[in-house]
Amino acid sequence: MIESVYAETSIFSYLTARPSRDLISAARQQITVQWWDTNREKYRIYASNLVVAEASQGDELRAQVRVESIRSIPLLEITQECARLAEKIIRDSPMPEKARDDALHAAVASFHSIDFLLTWNCRHLANAHVVPKVRAVVESEGFKFPQICTPEELMEDLK
């Protein structure tokens, strides 16, 4: 069975950004494009209306490019249960109030039993100090917690 990936907004930001002069950002852009071009067909890719809303913010031209990159991807429904789970994540884990949308990304992926949450957000999502505590909250509510990873970690061929 083909595994599923919830692509969080940072993936589309790096995928469609103008080339960066910052070395870390440039590397993330290159890795994201490489993953998108060589690995995405191996997975069922999903996003959500939250990803679309976040991608729509900022510079109008860049936002259009980001949103266009999402257009063909199925969107997972953000249910009341997702919102409730996100509230519990904020309340019972180290994820701060300002990361409410990040909690909702984790909740949506969990609610829909997604295998991987793909992100470059290493502050609130792909963070070794945060993940175990968020996982405990999600699993205590009876949901499957996705493996949170970057595109580099989800590459099958690192050549």
Image (tube, rainbow, N blue to C red):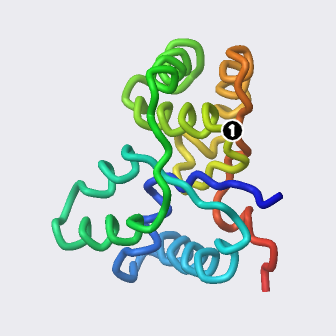
Quarter of the image that includes the C terminus = bottom right
Q: Is residue 16 above or below residue 54?
A: below
- Which amino acid lies under the numbered mark 1 shown in the image of this protein? Ser
At 46% across and 73% down in the image, what residue appears?
A: 15
Residue 21: x and y in percent read: 39, 80
Of residues 124 and 36, the one drawn nearer to the viewer in this rendering: 36
Of residues 124 and 12, the one drawn nearer to the viewer in this rendering: 12
Q: Secondary structure at mark 1?
A: loop
Left or right of 4 on screen, residue 48: left
At 44% across and 68% down in the image, what residue appears?
A: 72
At 51% across and 21% down in the image, what residue appears?
A: 81
Residue 137: x and y in percent read: 67, 19
Residue 31: x and y in percent read: 60, 76
Quarter of the image that includes the N terminus = bottom right
Please, which residue is most extreme toward the bottom here? 159
- Residue 150 sits in which quadrant? bottom right
Q: Is residue 11 above or below residue 155?
A: above
At 68% across and 34% down in the image, what residue appears?
A: 131
Q: How many marks?
A: 1
Residue 104: x and y in percent read: 47, 33
Of residues 58 and 146, the one drawn nearer to the viewer in this rendering: 146
Left or right of 70 on screen, residue 7: right
Q: Which residue is mark 1?
A: 113
